[in-house]
Amino acid sequence: MYCPIITELFAPVVAARGAAVAIVEDHHRTTYEQLDALSEQLAQRLRDAGVGPGSLVPIVAHRSAALVVAMLAVLKTGSAYTPIDRDNPSRRRAKIIEQCGAPVVLSTGSPSRESGTVTIEFADGPVFKPLEKGAAYVVFTSGTTGTPKGVVVDQKAVIRLVRWHNDRFDTGADARTTLMSGVGFDVSQWEIHSTLAAGATAHVVDPAVRADPAALLDFYAEHAITHAFVPTVLTPDVVAAPRPADLALRYLFCAGEKLPPIRTGPLPYTLVDYYGPTEATIFATCRVVDPAAEQAPSIGTPISDTEAFILDDELGEVDPGAVGELCLAGTCLARGYLGDRDRTEDRFVWSPRLERRLYRTGDLARWLPDGSIEFLGRSDDQVKIRGYRIELGDIEAAILDNRLVKHAVVVVDDQDRASSAKRLAAFVVPREHDTDPDALVRTLRVHMRDELPDYMQPGIYQCRTDLPVTANGKIDRAGLRADLAQDRDVPMPDAGFEGDIEHAVAEIWREVLGHNRFSATDNFFDVGGHSLLATALIGEISRRVGARVYIWDFYGDPTVRGLAAAINSRGDEAPDWEGEPVRELADDIHLPDGVDYRTGWDERQLTDPSHTLLTGATGIIGVHLLGRLHESTDAVVHCLIRAGSPALARERLRAVVARYEVTAVDWDRVRVHAGDLAEPRFGLDADEYAALASDVDVIYHSASAANFIQSYAYIRRDNVEGLRTVLRFAGDDHVKPLMLVSSISVYSWGHLFTGKSTMYEDDDIDQNLRAVVTDLGYMRSKWVMEKVAELAEAQGLPVMKFRLGYALCDARTGHAATYQWWPRLVKTCVALGAIPDLQNLREGLITVDYIVDAIAAIGRDPGAAGKNFNVVPAQDRIVTLRRFFELLEEHFGYEFRVLPYEQWVDLWKDDPQAPLYPLLNMFHDHMLDRRSTIELYQNTYLWDKTNVTEHLVGTGVEEPTLTPEILDRYLRRVLAEPYVPAAMADAR
């Protein structure tokens, strides 16, 4: 079978344009005739040295005409070459040369040598021929073991790319191109071969101007460059730089990383963004970018005969819009890795289903509605923070959405730290050189709180004048992580700290936060802290300062000075748990001013709604409820999501739908609104709010800050104030019935005060107030929310209150909110082989699908308005904590020791890697009668569910049993990343 060779592209150009200039290097000009003659002479010398088909010849070079001569000479011998940047460390050069097995090494010397001069040096190592006929070159990329890995690229793949590119982007004999890329970067192969095949002229970019956007544009103008390449990291600056009047540029190509949004007016040239791994011969997709238009953040569509597939772990195609691994097929695919069959077989696979050889890129992507591909980052850039799996690229995109920022890179700092305390660090380059770094960081923290959830907030921000890059023009993330390591060793400055306690507390803050950029009066949450880090902080303070510190001390005044004052004033005495007495909660029980529900409502708003408002759609209940509302009604569902823009809000929702595999969502009937529940008009503009108020028939309010660490004062804004904003909306334009998702926690540990064993759905929850005021802030907020909703009912608003038990998992998929306390308990107990001796601790474990089925079915029943519904298991199906672990023993072979409570807590309370460690206050801090929250929930109420049972008759919704099949799916999700206790890890 005939295989085309690259020299067949070169020969006719020499015949037709021999006297034309091929390469311009400083003041040297090399014609096509000279390239041909010099390369032929060198090729003969190589043949004499034993180089021929199957050989792999190293070329150690700078960007130069001599490099091109060497490449052509090797190809004329029927062998392949490997380009090595002369600026690479000598050890790396030696490792690459050793793998080539060639009898000689070609060297072009320094750039100052005579143009086209190539030196032949005889190699010291063994001589062998590692390749089969038809290879063009081998490019070495960084290997995870420290040994460079060589990617073997075919000549036919290079020819295919060159022909497609030159035809698509008008690269003809009149073109003037650049040699910009480093010699070891495969993009340089495209720069050279596309130019030679067109008979065009390539200009070697002066090293002094390669990193200077303004100087680059001047270079383009001086040499009348028509087709130029710049690495992605430089692209925004080149696009934004002042353009010389005589600029002849027609195309600017970029590649190397994900291109951030480009904001500028119309350009006098075409900007083209290329994507492609080395293993797919330089470029696999491309997109023509229009900086003046709003475009989806895509890498475009496949080029030439390249095919793209987005596949799951089993190499099955994912649904449109779902995230999967980008896999490529076609002539573009490399042969594999030089001398590494195992790696080749791992990354280059045969798909019987697709009947194609595929390259698994390791890049995460999804199809966009317009048929283009959105690149979401490397699968190894997907990290788990506080139980959530996130993409670093999403955080970078959110930072770049702020117009003050020109460049942003986010890395994970987890050196010498527990996995539960991984930190996100953001490195940003301001758009303006005179930007105050401290002011920018403050602005970004506020900006990001509106853009992304708290677990995606960088804890550390560093402002820089530029970002370090590798020799190939990519951002040097390893170097940035090394900078973080150096920062950790910077001693704590004085910063106005007073006394030994403040200085000691400040030092612990520095260790926990990973930086020292805070003062004695800075709020912990404004300088990179979050609720789970707070647990680690108070634990360290208690151990090292010599006084017990409680989580409530921290939330009372989360500053260095506030914590020090609490320690100094109280010593080892326990705090006053009645800090939020009945009067404080009672003061929050009121409606927003001026609401009016007297206009009445139509039952069809429930039975046949056209538009529904759903809050909390990014939570496990809300996202499943979204799918069920689409299945049970024809309504358009409006989702209010906290984000800085509608695009980001929609992406947040898409990510959650994909994470929980909610297949019932009909995206044609989803409307996403970027807003904030607690802000006036939900933070929407007047027109958007008015249209929403006019359209919506019914409200499903599922949003809630479910945090078992934060105080009521912190939670009340999102939960209580958020509900008040919803209640105002319920009366604006027309009355809208409200489905309020509440919790059985409104009953708290009331049994200790009421002496009752059962709570009925219509019981007055006021009787549990004595317990509520001593319970966690979240429980207090849910109680207040129900009381506020009762006021709205009294004024005529139709309300249904759904008090949920614990949403264990989706029975179909096993998906669970793995960051919540019950999955953390399961992981901890399984790892320890032990459970606490707790009596009748009931959480109301029930499946997510039953919860949303019940809400959706009852919510369409006008007769249910004004009633309360305990969505919990029937009393004879309640699974206590003890019974849950007995089921694991019976069906899965586990064995658990039942330990006295405090002995069990002692097994993990000092291990920051323990899944329960961030929630230590629930298990360790005494809340009432020297008992912790968890202990107080023993022997709690049984719950009546008469209303639920009556209103589900005839709906087909039936309460499930926790079968072994459901538990198996659940355990597979929860235990996917097992916890290894510190004692076991130390023993290994």
Image (spheres, helix red, strand yellow):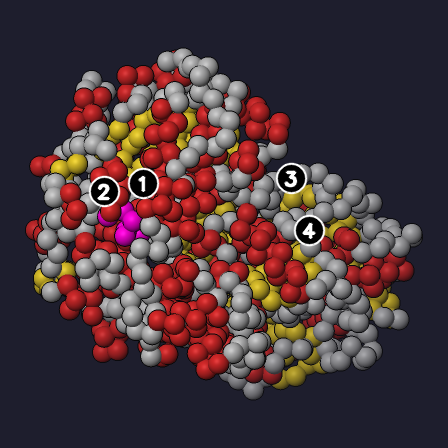
- In three-dimensional space, the C-alpha distance between marks 3 and 1, rounded to whole angstroms, equals 45 Å
Decide which of tag 4 and tag 3 comes sooner along the chain: 3
Q: What residue do we see at 36% from left, 79% from top?
A: 544
Decide which of tag 2 and tag 4 comes sooner along the chain: 4
* Span colored in magenta: 771-776
> Which residue does the numbered mark 1 point to in the structure image?
783
Three-letter code, disc 1: Trp
Labels 4 & 3 near each other (Cβ < 8 A): no
Labels 1 & 2 near each other (Cβ < 8 A): yes
Q: Nearer the viewer, mark 1 or mark 2?
A: 2
Three-letter code, disc 4: Arg
Give residue 768's mark. Answer: 2
Decide which of tag 1 and tag 4 comes sooner along the chain: 4
- In three-dimensional space, the C-alpha distance between marks 4 and 3, rounded to whole angstroms, equals 17 Å
Q: Is the residue marked by circle 3 packed among few (<14), some (14-19), or many (20+) residues within 10 Å? A: few
Q: What residue do we see at 80% from left, 56% from top?
A: 241
> Which residue does the numbered mark 4 point to in the structure image?
403
Q: Nearer the viewer, mark 1 or mark 4?
A: 1
Decide which of tag 1 and tag 2 comes sooner along the chain: 2
Indicate the secondary structure of the residue bearing disc 2. helix
Q: Is the residue marked by circle 2 packed among few (<14), some (14-19), or many (20+) residues within 10 Å? A: some
Quarter holding residue 643: top right
Image side of residue 687 versus residue 565, left or right:
right
Q: 281 and 87: which one is in front?
A: 87
Q: Nearer the viewer, mark 3 or mark 1?
A: 1
